[in-house]
Image (cartoon, coloured by chain):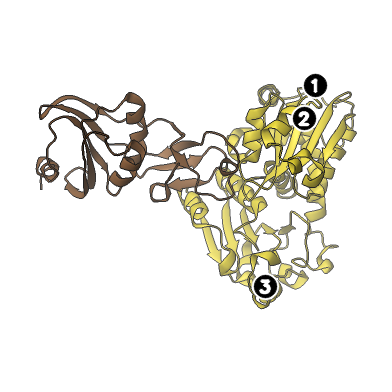
Amino acid sequence: MDRNWSGAETALARRMAGSDIVSVRQFAEADLRTLLDVVERFEGVNDPLLDGRVLGALFFEPSTRTRLSFESAMLRLGGRTLGFADEKISSTSKGESLADTIRMVEGYCDLIVLRHPREGAARLAAEATTRPVINGGDGSNQHPTQTLLDLYTIRRRCGRVNGLKVGFLGDLKYGRAAHSLIEALSMLGNELVLISPPTLRLPERRREELDEMHCEWAETDDMLEAVKDLDVLYVTRIQQERFGDPLEFERVRNTYQIDITIVDHGKPGMIVMHPLPRVNEIHPSLDASPQAAYFEQAKNGVTVRKALLAMLMGAVP
Amino acid sequence: MSNSQAGKQVAALRHGTVIDHMNAGMALKALGVLGVPKEGAALLGIGLASAKMGRKDILKLENVELLPAEIDKLAVFGPQATVSFIRDFKVVRKVKVELPATIAGILKCPNPNCISNFVRIETRFHVETETPLDVRCHYCERRIRENEFVLL
């Protein structure tokens, strides 16, 4: 791969070697931008930088994209992966504590990726081991590598990650992908439009934090009006289990479905993103549109994770 | 009403400790943490008028001399609190409570899904703002306001 890194990139890679990625909060604004520059360098790179290294993938909750893209990133850089994708097959089902599981696994691998239903589990894991830990999602708190791949996708498509108007549509109450990205975009200086049914609004404490960061934001339940001047529309899945009343769920689900006619209300350059899996928030007719960025987003996950794995394991040129 | 008048609304101590300038509504919680004196009374003043704070709480503990570790715990009940040690009705020493950057082991995270509520670890909260006192859970990163504080 290209070894002509800038001073800022080299300095960031040195600082990140051996460290953890637990939360998007840990990155200063300048570091986020530099990190995206480093990710760009891993585009199409399949060098055996991680030859002989082992990734421990501990997924206490189901995951398809995150787990497979970490595995793909590891394989493409010449490393291997072990782990489990179901809590039932781990010893925690026998009552083992998370910290003990982590201490045991650190003897088997060079880096740990953890997904866990409890918020703060990744922080606890990071403090239990000297191996680098990457948070692959902790409850409804953080999913930092998703945020980085979202930012990377926005930068590739829009050319920048600041001064944009970004709409978030769907479940803004529980969706951790939306929470992490909202935090990062507000820090980087973007205008946000929050579009959700009243029952799934962004929690009050998060709205207050947007004000404290002097972020320009607005809230609406009128999707057609909101999409008019957006650069990015970030759609999230509305989960049935969040609704007590199935009729209310059906009503909300149908009201917040995106199709080509809705996208046509927006600017021609507006991109549509989704962390996937989608159920029916985005009509398949949109998939062929150049404005659909969600499959590219999933693909970018591998590039982002290649860069992070190589940096954390100190294997960058 | 002046501060000294407000202080006199709660009877004077012969020997003991007076914790003044606690945030209004916090005296009972502080008493819960410090415990009722074994050989004496606890006197509380809740929501007293204060020129500096608007409203404040006072807690007087008879025949008790607080230890430094106990004083440190008081910061969560009001970063402006003062602790006076009383002997024969006279203040012999007065210290200001200091709010640490991280509050360890006093509060419980109110987020029911926080990992700290499922495993045996010392809770930790990072102070975000002093007035009003807002903290952030070290683990789940949830921001918690003073009126949401839950004691361990």
Return the chain for callout 1. A
> Circle 1 is placed at which residue position?
A317
Give the residue at x 81% y 48%: A65
The three-letter amino acid code for the residue at tag 1 is Pro
Return the chain for callout 3. A
Return the chain for callout 2. A
**Given this view, does label 1 or label 2 mark the residue nearer the observer?**
2
> Circle 2 is placed at which residue position?
A105
Q: Give the percent coordinates (x, y) of residue B124.
A: 50, 35
> Circle 3 is placed at which residue position?
A249
Q: Quadrant of residue A160?
A: top right
**Given this view, does label 3 or label 1 mark the residue nearer the observer?**
3
Chain identity for the colour yellow used in the image: A
- For residue A45, say whether it is visible: no
B35 or B73: nearer the eye? B35
Give the residue at x 43% y 37%: B106
* Mark nearer the N terminus (1 vs 2): 2
- For residue A63, say whether it is visible: yes
Which image quarter holds the C terminus of chain A? top right
What secondary structure is found at the residue carrying circle 3? Answer: helix
Q: Give the percent coordinates (x, y) of residue A127.
A: 63, 29
Q: Is residue A186 left or right of residue B132?
A: right
User: Cα distance, mark 1 to mark 2?
Assistant: 27 Å
Chain identity for the colour brown used in the image: B
Q: Give the percent coordinates (x, y) of residue A20.
A: 67, 30
The three-letter amino acid code for the residue at tag 2 is Val
Q: Is residue A280 above or below residue A315?
A: below
